[in-house]
Image (cartoon, helix red, strand yellow):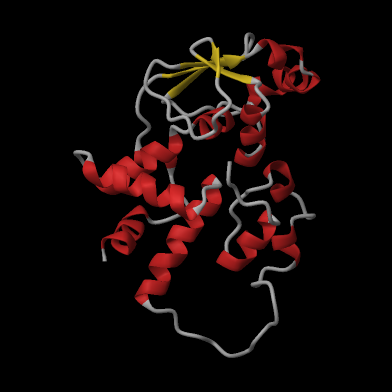
Amino acid sequence: MARYTGPVCRLCRRLGDKLYLKGEKCFTPKCPFEKRPYPPGQRSTRRRKVSDRGLQLREKQRARAIYGILERQFNKYYEIAAKRHGVTGETLLRTLELRLDNVAYRLGFADSRQQARQLVLHGHIAVNGRKSSIPSHVLKPNDVISLTGRGKKSEYFKIVSEQIASKSIPSWLSLDAGNLTGRVLALPEVAEIGPKFNVATIVEYYSR
């Protein structure tokens, strides 16, 4: 399955904003963005004016970096959202939030979406009692997320079980910290998600 394998901190520097792609490391002084809060590559003192199209592209790249999605798949999500009833931007954002890797991250099973993706790929996560190794699996309300037999035996989740109760869970999810199971209660609201990018600008980018 295709995914970005380069240094994720470089993406934050390129986009000029801390996207918290490395989990706990992003909150420490070791974060590369704190040390070098400027774009990678040769530095220039000349200021360049960014066009409207460039701003739209930057917002799209920001969303892709946050959710760890390549262009082809992101474009497919947009096309599906555009065909559905409702506001295209909100539908697109809800689809991204309901990906299995993102839900595992929101439940506190991992410190970052990248780490949650690895947990799914390694067969530690089950959906409705059946193992799912597809990070892009889009969940629905009432779907239950739990650990597989392999996940329950993992030393990693023994550590998670001791820390997960202190983590904040969005209202559209429920968590049983004792059994490390979660449920999708409803579709996520855009206001609660609080995306670090402008969804309307992304829609403008694709609709031109």
Q: Is residue 190 left or right of residue 134?
A: left
- Residue at image x 57%, y 61%? 17
- Residue at image x 39%, y 19%? 185
Could one spot residue 176 in this view of the protein? Answer: no
The extreme bottom residue here reads 46
In this orientation, which residue lies closer to the viewer: 99 or 48?
A: 99
The extreme left residue here reads 85
Query: Could you tell me residue 204's position as x and y percent?
Result: 29, 62
Query: Could you tell me residue 63's position as x and y percent?
Result: 47, 53
Q: Does residue 62 sit above or below 164 in this rendering?
A: below
Query: Could you tell me residue 92's position as x and y percent?
Result: 35, 44
Q: Is residue 32 left or right of residue 80?
A: right
- Residue at image x 49%, y 60%? 61
Number of dots carrying numbers? 0
In this orientation, which residue lies closer to the viewer: 41 or 22?
A: 41
Q: Is residue 79 left or right of residue 101?
A: left
Residue 207 found in image quarter: bottom left
Quadrant where the N terminus sits is top right
Query: Could you tell me residue 113's position as x and y percent?
Result: 60, 39
Could one spot residue 155 in this view of the protein? Answer: yes
Quadrant where the C terminus sits is bottom left
- Residue at image x 67%, y 68%? 37
Q: Does residue 21 sit above or below 100 in this rendering?
A: below
